[in-house]
Image: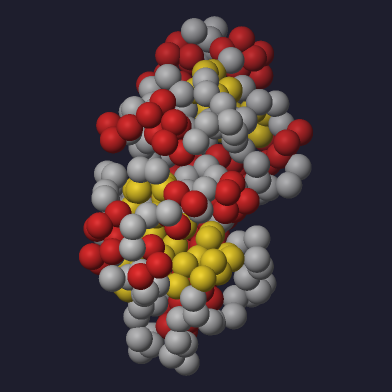
Amino acid sequence: MRIVSLLPAATDLVAELGRLDDLVGRTHECDWPPGVEAVPVVTSADLDDAVLSSREISDAVGGSAHRGSSLYSVDTARLAGLAPDLVLTQDLCEVCAVSYTRVAEAVRMLDAGPRVLSLEPRRLGEVLGCVTTLGDALGVPALARERVRALSARLDAVRARVAGRARPRVVALEWLDPLWPAGHWVPEQITAAGGTPLLAEAGEHTRPMAWDAVVAARPDVLLLLPCGFTPDRTAAELPLLTGLPGWDRLAAEVWLLDGPAYFNRPGPRVVRGAEILASVLHGIEADPPVTAAEARRIRGLLPRHR
């Protein structure tokens, strides 16, 4: 089967199911697993987020409306040349990846009619459910069930290790200007790791909020995991927070995390995200151990309840 993934999380899922050799096309943002850069790219971004500030990017994609319908382009000619049997996409967020609508328009222009599979999880269980959905589409349902069992066991292990511990109050931010709380599956990652998520509900598609809301929430821990930003790019954006009124009085431990790898994308690596959070919130050692590239403490040290 010839697969084109127009969603970075879907590329992760293809890898989880051992079918990377069948991947013939990807997005320009698919950066994992190692070696995927050799797969032809069939999309491009219509803005350069490397030179724009967070506020400029937010304004360009529609601000609080969270639209972004013109953010990405699909190279229809190249897509046709790859002759895919299956195209993986999403319709959850047009800011995060190519939308289902745009993909459907591109596919209609092809001579052949590949199947288009849209993956749209909002909750942690639905993320794991995508493994099963894709496994069925690829004809490997038994392997998919096995991988879901393994991922679920890892989550259960995290929950067991934090059971009975004091649960710190946690605010997670997926954008810094404007401030945007992380919703969808992130609150469940926090809960699984032994924290109490604030300012967003599980499955929620959130909206921007005022800095006063963060201060009023009185978090013990503040997680910074901007969507699409590397940790180094997030570090460069820190003055957006440290310059806010009352920053110095915010009694919270602050952590900078790798959002795209473990929190923004609804793929199997969200399980690693929960393991990372258990280390951040409770000092529980993960296997493999959490690295500075995955989680970096910016300030503070939360008392550990072991």
Asked if residue 157 shows in the view, the reply is: no
Q: How many labels does the image show?
A: 0
Residue 69 vertical placement versus 169 (above, below): above
**Residue closer to the observer: 143 or 197:** 197
Please state if 122 lies on the left or on the right of 46 as rendered. left
Please state if 73 lies on the left or on the right of 65 as rendered. right
Query: Residue 16 appears at what percent x and percent y?
Result: 60, 52
Q: Quadrant of residue 215?
A: bottom left
Query: Residue 61 appears at what percent x and percent y?
Result: 39, 28
**Residue closer to the observer: 123 or 56:** 56
**Residue closer to the observer: 11 or 304:** 304
The quarter in which the N terminus is drawn is: top right
Query: Residue 178 appears at what percent x and percent y?
Result: 35, 43
What colouring style does the render use? secondary structure
Q: In which quarter of the image is residue 57?
A: top left
Residue 215 vertical placement versus 18 (above, below): below
**Residue closer to the observer: 246 or 170:** 246
Q: Quadrant of residue 194?
A: bottom left
Q: Which residue is drawn at 24% across and 58% down?
A: 213
Query: Residue 199 appears at what percent x and percent y?
Result: 26, 59
Residue 72 vertical placement versus 176 (above, below): above
Q: Residue at x 28, y 35 (%)?
A: 64
Q: Residue at x 52, y 31 (%)?
A: 52
Q: Which residue is drawn at 35% across and 86% down?
A: 166
Q: Residue furthest bottom?
A: 306
Asked if residue 25 shows in the view, the reply is: yes
